Amino acid sequence: MKKHFHKEYIKHQDKIDGFINDFATSGKLLGNEKRNSIKLFELEDQTINIKSFKIPNIFNKLAYKFLRKSKAQRSYEYAEKLINLGIGTPKPVAYYEFNKGLFFDKSYYVSEQIDCDLTYRELIRDLNYPDHEKILREFTKFTFKLHENHVYFLDHSPGNTLVKKEDGIYKFYLVDLNRMQFKPLSFYERIQNFERLTVHESMVKTMSEEYAKLIDKPYQEVFNLMWKSTQEYQQKFHHKRQLKKRLKFWEK
């Protein structure tokens, strides 16, 4: 086993070890368990979040053992980078990795739990959500801040941004961090980074308008590319879903 702790949490190492060892039978489940499993645990006067990553396929069992950092380690290190850049994300606590013989097996990422008021997904589900336009414009500014700090969040999707209102100000926190790149972004990459966020043209128009002001580009140029990227992503998404349905049919 390999584990690494944030210095503030080393004193809780034995307690968190127990959470990891008893993960299957303890903790409060958060969300579904389609791919990875997330559970909440009480640690003194706070709640921590432990994400158990799905055991990888045989190729990644070797890759994570010898060639690449695990999803848990990347999540921890990326969280530290984001916080150092002044970008919101739950504070990292620790990560764990387990091997079976020559193969990588399971990994866990531990972070502080943030009780948010909503995620970006609520803005898609309810176009009349209170402060909808204000939140959307502030989210666009948050995304611009990511790009200006050379953060390319590859999983920039509706469920991966938590929103918390504090003293009338909306603050944003990224989760599901293991797929990121840190590099200067081209104009195309910046706008394409919005493609997974919504199917609503009205929301794309608002985000395009705000981002155009921030990047000092014509609105129509930003909108055309953002809407084109959104439509292309949706076509690919639905094509993949239909393909999976056909494959499942033939498996029956």
Image (cartoon, helix red, strand yellow):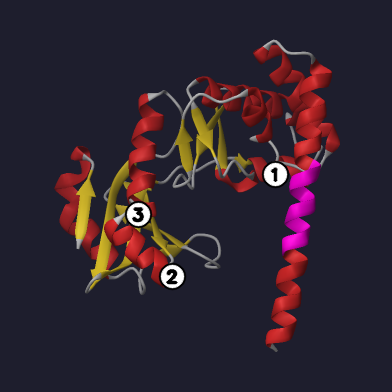
Percent position of residue 65, x then y: 28, 61
The kind of residue on which mark 3 rests is: Ser
Residue in the picture at 70% in, 89% down: 252
Q: Which mark is nearer the camera, 3 or 1?
A: 3
Q: Is residue 238 magenta?
A: yes
Q: Nearer the viewer, residue 46 or 225?
A: 225
Q: Residues within 10 Å of mark 3 (few under 14, many from 20)?
A: many
Residue that badge 3 annotates:
70
Q: Which numbered disc covers residue 122?
A: 1
Pointer 2 or 1: first along the chain = 2
Where is residue 221, by image quadrant?
Answer: top right
Residue 83 is left or right of residue 196, and the answer is left
Is 106 placed above or below 109 here? below
Q: Nearer the viewer, residue 123 or 248?
A: 248
Majority secondary structure in the magenta region:
helix
> What residue is at 55 percent from the left and 40 percent from the top?
162
- Dot 1 falls on a residue whose secondary structure is helix
